[in-house]
Image (spheres, rainbow, N blue to C red):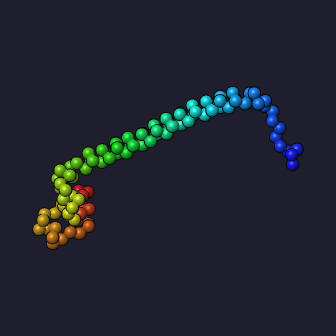
Amino acid sequence: MTASAIPATETSGSLPSDRSAALGRLKLRDAGFRFMTFGSASLVLILLLGVAITLFIGAWPAFQHFGLDFFIRACPHLSQASAQTSCRPAEKLRAVFS
């Protein structure tokens, strides 16, 4: 079993300098990976913010027309009296897409 062991080919004098060089390379690569990860995460957040702003700008006419009733009332497109008598989902969809 000992015959299959890997023999040590390096001298003990060259080991610390090789190790410090390897650690230096790893430190540089870690910094690069950290920078790329932070950049990617920042890009995702910026894109999500852009999507949210675009959706808000696109929905602004509905907010101006219906106000908060757009979220609160079941059928904001109908008047108060009409909403109490009939409010079907098909009417709501017709009003949104027309």
* Relative depth, front residue between 27 and 56: 27
User: In which quadrant of the rendered image does the C terminus lie?
Assistant: bottom left
11 vs 75, left or right, is right
* Relative depth, front residue between 75 and 40: 40
Q: Picture quarter containing residue 54?
A: top left
Check the image and report above or below for 81 versus 29: below
Q: Picture quarter containing residue 11?
A: top right
**Residue depicted at 34% across the width and 42% down the height:** 50
Numbered marks: total: 0
Q: Position of residue 42 (x, y in %)?
A: 42, 39
* Relative depth, front residue between 20 and 74: 20
Check the image and report above or below for 88 versus 40: below
Q: Position of residue 45 (x, y in %)?
A: 39, 43
Q: Position of residue 71 (x, y in %)?
A: 23, 59
**Residue depicted at 20% across the width and 49% down the height:** 61
46 vs 61, left or right, is right
Residue lying at the far bottom of the rendered structure? 85
